[in-house]
Image (cartoon, rainbow, N blue to C red):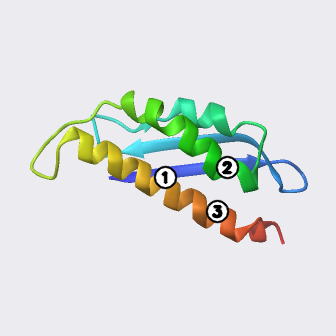
Amino acid sequence: MNVAMAWSLNAGGSTIRSARVRVGALGSRPQPLTAVEDALRNVAVAEARRAIETALPAALDQLEVNADRHGGADYKRHLAGVLLLRNADEAIIAGGSWLK
């Protein structure tokens, strides 16, 4: 399983203009977490984790998940959330250093 996330920031690098979040290897195709993308729009980077945590339960419930020998659907949804929050934490810690 993988979770990919991309943020488009304002000129100062402090606010998320838009976000794209995709979860792969859960179903037949990569799937967007649209509720998370919407929750991140126009949010300060410092507040991104809180916005994700608020939208995440509903977003994960929307995922098509194939249970298999690697885990059940609930476990895989939980893991997708953990991976997304780790990605967000890394981006927040970087604090826009990629702009410098």
Q: From the viewer's perspective, is residue 74 above or below residue 92?
A: above
* Depth order, front residue of 28/96: 96
Instruction: Give the labeled residue for mark 3.
Output: 91
Q: Quadrant of residue 30?
A: top left
**Amino acid under disc 2:** Ala
Residue at 75 percent across and 66 percent down: it is 95
Alpha-carbon neighbours of circle 3 within 10 Å: few (<14), some, or many (≥20)?
many
Image mark for residue 48: 2
- SS type, badge 2: helix
Instruction: Give the labeled residue for mark 1.
Output: 84
70 to the left or right of 98: left
For discs 3 and 2, the disc positioned in front in the rendered view: 2
Q: Please report whichever mark, 1 or 2, sits nearer to the chain's N-terminal start.
A: 2
Residue at 56 percent across and 50 percent down: it is 5
**Amino acid under disc 3:** Ala
Q: Quadrant of residue 98?
A: bottom right
Residue 13 on image: x %, y %: 83, 56
Alpha-carbon span between mark 1 and mark 2: 11 Å
Query: Outermost residue, left direction?
Result: 69
Residue 25 on image: x %, y %: 30, 46
Alpha-carbon span between mark 3 and mark 1: 11 Å
* Depth order, front residue of 9/50: 50
- In the picture, the quarter occupied by the C terminus is bottom right
Residue 43 on image: x %, y %: 76, 42
- SS type, badge 1: helix
